[in-house]
Amino acid sequence: MQGRAWTGFGAVAAMLYVTIAPWAAAESTSLDAEFDLGAARAATPHFYEMRTTSITYEQDGARKPYHELGLLLRCTPGEGGRVEYTCVRMTVRTDGDASEVPELAGWSYEFRPEQTGSSATGDMFGIHHGKFQELADASGQTLDPALSYAVYNAFVDFHAMCNVFAEPTHDGAGIQDLKRLGDTIVHAAASSEPTVHLEGVTESGSTFRNGRITLGLKGLGLVDGAPCAIVAYDSGESSFAMAMEPAPGMSIDAVGSSHYFGDIYVDLDSMWVAKAALSEFVVTDVTMDGAPLANSVVERTIGIHAVTEHALEELARVE
């Protein structure tokens, strides 16, 4: 059920600005107009650039870049509402220049909104776990498990913002219930508890519990000249528990809290996301075999931007 559960995170708050334009469903262009944010998306290909940055805060307050991910996606609508997503390029940067992950270049999957991690494999949204096992960069260096998980989670984050929040839900409140500026709802995914299991990295039973997720229609704006609805969302108090077994007989558990929030700009003509942003703060306590091991504070930011097909091709050629 779309919008009921996912490994979700939030977004950096975007600047609100208002422009009067002929985008209201009604004849009036007044800010009191009623909007239909549950309308069907245009059946046209779309292309996206996504960048994720994670920064770890040291005990003295210093900010230490942890990793940066770059993702290029092609979205191709098909018959019956199906949408195929193709990873054009994925890059990772932990130190120095970014390096491509060749195994993911050209990989395609069909988005499955009903898959929320509750199956035996824990697959999310049609994203199969097996693709993320033993990933390597362009030099052949195997990515460490934490980075492999971050690469996998980039796809989940994309769909959380661009589908779970930005498309109508079929069971419970969603974006379709935001009719006028200032409207706020509690989203159907509030208090959901999806799995965060990834084979080879986290054990079955690892979960993320969403807080009281709210969506609000906060304003109108322009993205590349296109009129957009600005939809804000906030996770409330979220938490997680992850179990890992990096070696036989070794048990590592991580528990913590998360707060994510941000804005999504929905193109009022095509109903596709024009851009979105994320900010998340994560506090984690880690134990090994029951003994304290480490704790951390991490800040994540994500930016998603719709681009033209030509721009996507140019970005894919950048070394």
Image: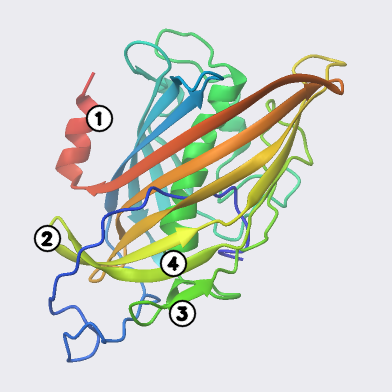
* SS at badge 3: helix
Please tell me whether mark 4 or mark 3 is closer to you in this view: 3
Q: How far, Cα to Cα, is label 2 from label 4?
A: 22 Å
Please tell me whether mark 1 or mark 2 is closer to you in this view: 2
Q: Earlier in the sequence, mark 1 or mark 4?
A: 4
Q: In which quarter of the image is residue 250?
A: top right
Q: How far, Cα to Cα, is label 4 from label 3?
A: 11 Å
Residue to which mark 2 is pinned: 225
Disc count in the image?
4
Please tell me whether mark 1 or mark 4 is closer to you in this view: 4
Q: Viewer-proximal residue, 57 or 82?
A: 57
Image quarter where the C terminus lies is top left
Residue at 39% x, 13% y: name it.
138
Please tell me whether mark 1 or mark 3 is closer to you in this view: 3
Q: In which quarter of the image is residue 176?
A: bottom left
Residue to which mark 4 is pinned: 167
Residue 170, position as x, y percentages in the image: 56, 74
Dot 1, crowdedness within 10 Å: few (<14), some or many (≥20)? some
- Under mark 1, the amino acid is Ala
Q: Viewer-proximal residue, 130 or 209?
A: 209
- Is residue 177 visible from the viewing direction of this image? yes
Residue to which mark 3 is pinned: 177
- Under mark 4, the amino acid is Glu
Q: Residue 316 carries which label?
A: 1
Please tell me whether mark 2 or mark 4 is closer to you in this view: 2
Q: Earlier in the sequence, mark 2 or mark 4?
A: 4
